[in-house]
Amino acid sequence: MEHQINLPITGMNCESCTSIITQNVKKMDGVLAVEVSLATEYAAVTFDTSTLSEEAIVNKIRDLGFDVVDEDKEDEARAEEFRRQKLQFTIGVICTLPLFLISMGRDMNMLGAWASAHWVNYLMFGLALPVQGYVAWDYYIGGFKALRNRSANMDVLVAMGSSVAFLYSLVVTIALTTSAGERFGAHVYFETAAVIVTLIKLGKLLEARAKGKINAALKKLPQLAPQTACRLKDGEEQNIPIEQVGVGDVLVVRPGESIPVDGVVRSGESAIDESVFTGESLPVDKGPGDPVTAATMNQSGMLTIKATHVGTETALSRLVQLVYTTQQSKPPIQRVADAVTNVFVPIVAAIAVVTFLAWWFLLGAGFTPAMLRLVAILVTACPCALGLATPTAVMMGTGIGAQRGILFRNGEALERAGNLTTIVLDKTGTLTEGKLKLTDILTDKDESELLQLSAAAERGSEHPIGKAVVQAAQERGLDIATPSQFKAVTGHGITAQVGESGVVIGNLSLMQQHDIQTRIFEAEAERLQTEAKNVLLGAVEVRVVGLLAVSATLKSEAQAAVAELYELGCTVTMMTGDNRVTADAIAKASRISDVMAELKPEDKAAAVKKLQAENGGLVAMVGDGINDTPALAQADIGISLGTGTDIARETAHVTLMHSDLRGLPDAIRLSRSTMRTIKQNLFWAFFYNILLIPIAAGALYPLPFVPMMFRELHPMLAAFAMAFSSVSVVLNSLRLQWREKVRF
């Protein structure tokens, strides 16, 4: 049986670490897929439970040198890890600062003759030893385990760079007390070894804090739902844990309380704050029959609701799970970074060794200058920035989307949404409201009387048109009688006996069947039909008394959303199974010029395929019904609305939780901003390495007009640059929340 687990992992320092886990876990029998994210510090593993166990996967990851923490204790474990890293950094600063001051003061002749005494070298050794033995211990252990698994990561580079400087300095210190001292020179580099480790540790702390900010909003989402619920059973209220709420339970929600689970209002009216999903500050009025969502806030009235989705099936749980899954997945652009990272560390190590040998033997620079260049290359080239470039931006983009009710299924959907050229909009439930509404009443008598009589006749109807008539009467507070007789005439209307009156409600064909003259209202009926409205003629005792018009009204934001899509450079097409007259009327109101009408579900998929072939760009299909599912699957990006069917949401690549069409252009803009950030991050990560590795190797040394600090890149400066590159990538991703101003 196929099963997926999400494992919180600690101990990953760079993208090479994720590659080590991915490659080794993939080799296990029964593993079907592995996604490891440095930014989220999670591994998503899909495996066959008949072949492999979760315990075996966890043990394998631990054997690789990383730790898998208990998901229930993840926050505690990560907080403890951060405290440990902070303590290491603090000790590093306490030891490194005096070490650095002594070394620099001695080199600049600011400390007097005592600073040149041999015992000062031992003092510096004593200060550097805790840094190597405690602060850098993680890098040594991580590097050893990586090499044991025939891999190489950031730990290997840091351990090699700092240990070379430290061990060389130790040899010089010991040699200076013997006759062999002159062979090595008098200078030691304990401060270099210590500063490298401490600066990199500082970079990791800043990086961890920034990543924590990226994830903070998402981690708060599950906490928004209440932990208890008030269940109404046998007329009594019972406070129970949220885990005990089942589908079908009736719950009481008072003003000021959060909705505990997804459900439908049974009684009561209230204003619901749905900003947790939509970002919309204005509350939404809810009454009997309206859906409510877990974690939204009941503001004004007491409600009783019937639970429809509980536990992991609520919209909140699905939202959180989907965002985590998206953050684990990698957009196609990440493949470039992965391909480079897989070979990066071995290549850099080789470059460092070749540089060392070239400067020592071929150029005759001596052992010490050659060693410093080797250390500078090793420290400069840590692939942290490359590993963080894509996942931090994806985390930020999906986090912003989740807060605004825009859910991307995976990283590929996030990337492709920004490249859409054609948007296909289904009519019913997408451009128009999902429910029919009464829009017009024409009669030579009293409007309320006609509506009251029609609602009584339609009371037994299950047809959406009949329900719209009944709802309109209820909203006006009219008393609705129960018909003594009722008959539905499929495709035409209904006949009923209301009190002593025989009532016929339906289309022109039904009136003709009953020999009812309708000439007085035919012109108005034709006019209303051209406005995409369903016209019902009403007759009492074989005499027509008026007409009712029902339609699915255009969403208030539809026209503005379509205009924004055009501004973004997209072509917009409307697709519907309705007749041409209705389709043209809705398209005209929406200001959509391209219309496809009278399409069956399979025709919609074929039409999307044709658009893909003709336009050459990426095509999105936006729909919410079962009949839209084939087209959603065919499209390059399927987009469903939160009010849509489960199968539509499952098929779609993007879901708009708030069902507001303005989320479409927002999703495209968010995708484009995220991809722009990823490209910026990758550019700077690549540029940083491409620029600094040659400088560290001495490429600028022959140029006298270049400042000496760049001609001979000191390992301490290299360590600062490496730490800065990682932090800058994370901070650039954080800028998304200020750059991307989404409307809701």
Image (tube, rainbow, N blue to C red):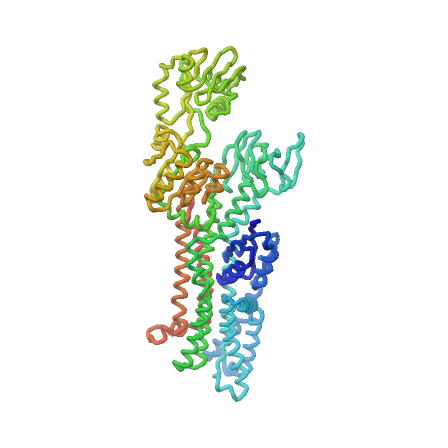
Q: How many marks?
A: 0
Q: Quadrant of the C terminus?
A: top left
Residue 463, horizontal then vertical, whole percent: 48, 25
Residue located 41% across and 12% down the image: 515
Q: Nearer the viewer, residue 326 or 210?
A: 326
- Rendered view: 266 above or below 694: above
Residue 402 in view in this figure: yes
Residue 624, horizontal then vertical, whole percent: 45, 37
Q: Indicate left or right for 716 with 89 as reference.
A: left
- Rendered view: 221 above or below 90: above
- Rendered view: 225 above or below 53: above
Q: Nearer the viewer, residue 554 or 246?
A: 246
Q: Indicate left or right for 270 with 532 as reference.
A: right
Q: Nearer the viewer, residue 509 or 309?
A: 509
- Rendered view: 10 above or below 465: below
- Residue lying at the far bottom in this picture: please name it: 179
Q: Indicate left or right for 294 with 338 as reference.
A: right
Residue 135 in view in this figure: no
Residue located 37% across and 24% down the image: 529
Residue 535, horizontal then vertical, whole percent: 40, 22
Residue 237, horizontal then vertical, whole percent: 66, 33
